[in-house]
Image (tube, rainbow, N blue to C red):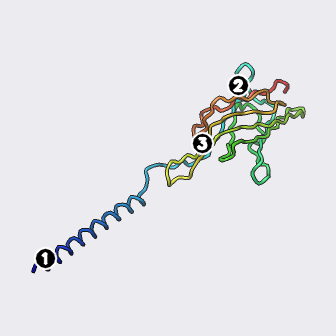
Amino acid sequence: MRSENNLGKQITMRKVWGWLATTFLISHFSFLVSCTNIDCPVQNTVFTNYSMLKPDGTPDTLDTDTLWVWTRRADGNDSVLINRLCGSKTSFQLQISHTLSEDTLCTLLMDTIGNMWADTIYVKKENFPHFESVDCQPAYFHTITDVRCTHHGIDSLIINQRQVNYDATQTHFYLYLKDQR
């Protein structure tokens, strides 16, 4: 009679452990497949903002001059970033590469009588992956460490804001064009 009692307790303990294991697995799997409440950004590309300024710090426009900007892609082909910027614009945005430590941008500035000035801009930066959630695609934020350029049509290029992220209101660079145009 004693052995029958032990058998009944063992069956009960097996049921309890089975129930606990099932509850544990269900709760953990439901956690893994549950939805997050984080909204992924629709556009996770970050841009650098360039403001064109005159030597006295007032906004500069291209007026009748025209500006082109392009870069060389990893496959060796050119990629046009800005095609024929002209008029009353005082600023523009450019994408920044995800993983290169230095971006190389080629510019061509042309006036109305056909004078052209070609420059190259080099932007050194550190790249940091940025994750909103495992449900979202990763983005890259950057810290600009240095900028330099040739000085044919560009007088100077100054870093204003080193951090590049989703904040599109920040001006990252001040671009001063030469007066010869």
Pair 3/1: label in front: 1
Badge 1 or badge 2: first in the primary sequence: 1
Residue marked by disc 2: 59
Pointer 2 with pointer 3, Cβ within 8 A: no
How far from the left and from the top, in percent, is residue 42?
A: 56, 49
139 and 171: which one is in front? 139
Placement of 29 over or under 46, stated as above or below:
below
Placement of 88 over or under 22, stated as above or below:
above
Q: What amino acid is at disc 3?
A: Phe
How far from the left and from the top, in percent, is residue 41?
A: 54, 47
Pointer 3 with pointer 1, Cβ within 8 A: no
Residue marked by disc 3: 141
Residue at 68% over, 31% down: 173
Q: Within 10 Å of the Cα at label 2, are there few (<14), some (14-19), or many (20+) other Cα atoms?
A: some
Residue marked by disc 1: 5
Residue at 24% over, 72% down: 14
Secondary structure of residue under mark 1? helix
Badge 2 or badge 3: first in the primary sequence: 2
Residue at 82% over, 30% down: 151
Residue furthest left in the image: 1
Q: What amino acid is at disc 1?
A: Asn
Q: In terms of image quadrants, where is residue 3?
A: bottom left
Q: What amino acid is at disc 2?
A: Pro
Badge 3 or badge 1: first in the primary sequence: 1
Tell me: 37 left or right of 104: left
Quarter containing the C terminus = top right
